Image (cartoon, helix red, strand yellow):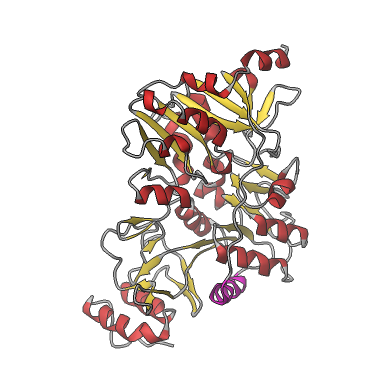
């Protein structure tokens, strides 16, 4: 087969390609930094002539023009599987809704026919000599989306790194209906997040829980990045990586010689991930790098697969936690902030791992509207707050004041352990509330 000829035959302008979108269609965008702003801009020009179009994405890092072009939602409904900062702002304006999921189940939504895209608008790397176009730094569940889509439209961008697999890291030209050559804009870079002194204190405590030969998962945020920076400067050895997101701190650790992957039980010597977001330094690191292997999320986040590696250390953030041990990482009351993502997957997976530890990290306080410190460890979660990790599954909780391990602890033991790592100035009030909730006993003592 002449792949180049097939490529040329399918090559059309963006405005021509998006004519495939009809009223009532489910249009699936790409995921993370592989969302195509170029195809979105072309679709935005057609919004007024369409009705009942549902656009879905995963963590789109920009506000889609097709959504902004319809502020009254007469033509387009927009959904996100995990809220980016852009999606959060649109949600506040009633222009975006969240799709709840455990991330490792996402592929099955399409395999089982729960979701079938009419049109997939994706972004890919240039075609290789075998007719394959690489999905770049996001496999996630985009292959399954393309499997079910009636029409696949691919923007080719020559700035995309070729990310080696793994599994299903590419799509063949025969599976694409229209090719669009875009503007070759560089991938979106994440801004560098400031790391506070409190973040550094938490990171130092986390570092003490990591052993030589551990297998790491880092979530998004300043504190996990702080952990990575400290590991890079530490004397830890033979670390492995099996994570959901690959971020810049993994590059720091690898180049410092901390990551080898030699002690992993699965995918030895490979840094396993399902998507990457960060700086151009990260994207350059990934390009044709055999030290890295990108897989669909049904593999990277399956708790039973995660647990087959020993000493898995999962490090994730939270918004607040209550004295029962329930973790809230998605909303504060009805204010939607994030999504479940892979947090629950890796808390479970770390527990299944021999010697594993799943760490939920949060600062002990935040500033209230009046400027006074408010505890992130609360008697009960605020009304409307979504539970991300149930109390029965929660494992470790870390603040700048210490670490609480919650497994096999009763309600009063949990309350004691969590109050022990709350801000000292706010502990007395938490004790009073614990007594009112009947989860405090006379023998309880704080360190």
Question: What is the x, y in percent for residue 100?
Answer: 37, 45
Q: Is residue 197 magenta?
A: yes
For the point 47% across and 45% down, the residue is: 103
For the point 40% across and 28% down, the residue is: 47
Q: Is residue 84 visible?
A: no
Q: Is residue 395 visible?
A: yes
| Image quadrant containing the N terminus | top right
- Position of 207 relative to 292 (above/below): below
Q: Specify the quadrant of the image occupied by residue 227.
A: bottom right
Question: What is the x, y in percent for residue 236?
Answer: 71, 68
Q: Is residue 349 magenta?
A: no
Q: Which residues are magenta?
A: 196-209
For the point 40% across and 76% down, the residue is: 418
For the point 36% across and 64% down, the residue is: 326
- Predominant secondary structure in magenta? helix
Question: What is the x, y in percent for residue 86?
Answer: 46, 49
């Amino acid at each position: 087969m002449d792949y180049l000829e097939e490529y040329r035959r399918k090559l059309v302008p963006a405005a021509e390609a998006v004519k495939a979108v009809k009223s009532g269609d489910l249009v699936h965008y790409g995921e993370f930094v592989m969302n195509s702003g170029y195809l979105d801009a072309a679709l935005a020009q057609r919004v007024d002539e369409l009705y009942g179009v549902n656009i879905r994405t995963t963590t789109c890092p920009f506000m889609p023009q097709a959504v902004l072009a319809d502020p009254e939602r007469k033509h387009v409904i927009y959904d996100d599987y995990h809220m980016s900062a852009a999606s959060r702002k649109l949600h506040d304006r009633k222009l975006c809704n969240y799709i709840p999921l455990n991330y490792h189940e996402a592929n099955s939504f399409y395999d089982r026919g729960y979701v079938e895209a009419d049109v997939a608008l994706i972004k890919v790397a240039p075609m290789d000599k075998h007719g394959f176009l690489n999905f770049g730094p996001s496999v996630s569940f985009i292959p399954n989306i393309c499997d079910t889509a009636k029409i696949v439209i691919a923007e080719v961008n020559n700035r995309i790194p070729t990310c080696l697999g793994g599994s299903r890291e590419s799509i063949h030209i025969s599976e694409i209906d229209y090719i669009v050559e875009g503007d070759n804009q560089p991938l979106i870079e994440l801004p560098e997040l400031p790391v506070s002194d409190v973040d550094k204190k938490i990171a130092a405590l986390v570092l003490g829980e990591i052993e030589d030969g551990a297998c790491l998962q880092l979530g998004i945020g300043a504190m996990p990045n702080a952990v990575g920076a400290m590991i890079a400067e530490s004397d830890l050895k033979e670390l492995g990586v099996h994570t959901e997101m690959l971020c810049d701190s993994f590059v720091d650790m690898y180049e410092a010689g901390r990551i080898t992957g030699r002690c992993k039980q699965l995918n030895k010597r490979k840094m396993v991930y399902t998507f990457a977001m960060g700086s151009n330094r990260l994207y350059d690191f990934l390009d044709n790098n055999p030290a890295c292997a990108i897989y669909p999320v049904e593999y990277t986040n399956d708790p039973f697969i995660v647990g087959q590696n020993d000493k898995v250390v999962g490090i994730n953030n939270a918004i607040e936690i209550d004295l029962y041990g329930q973790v809230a990482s998605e909303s504060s009351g009805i204010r939607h902030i994030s999504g479940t993502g892979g947090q629950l997957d890796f808390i479970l997976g770390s527990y299944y791992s021999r010697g594993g530890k799943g760490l939920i990290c949060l600062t002990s306080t935040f500033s209230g509207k009046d400027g006074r410190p408010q505890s992130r460890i609360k008697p009960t979660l605020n009304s409307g707050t979504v539970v991300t990790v149930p109390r029965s599954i929660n494992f470790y909780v870390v603040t700048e004041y210490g670490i609480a391990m919650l497994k096999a602890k009763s309600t009063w033991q949990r309350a004691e352990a969590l109050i022990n790592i709350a801000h000292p100035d706010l502990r007395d009030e938490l004790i009073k509330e614990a007594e009112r909730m009947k989860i405090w006993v006379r023998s309880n003592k704080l360190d």
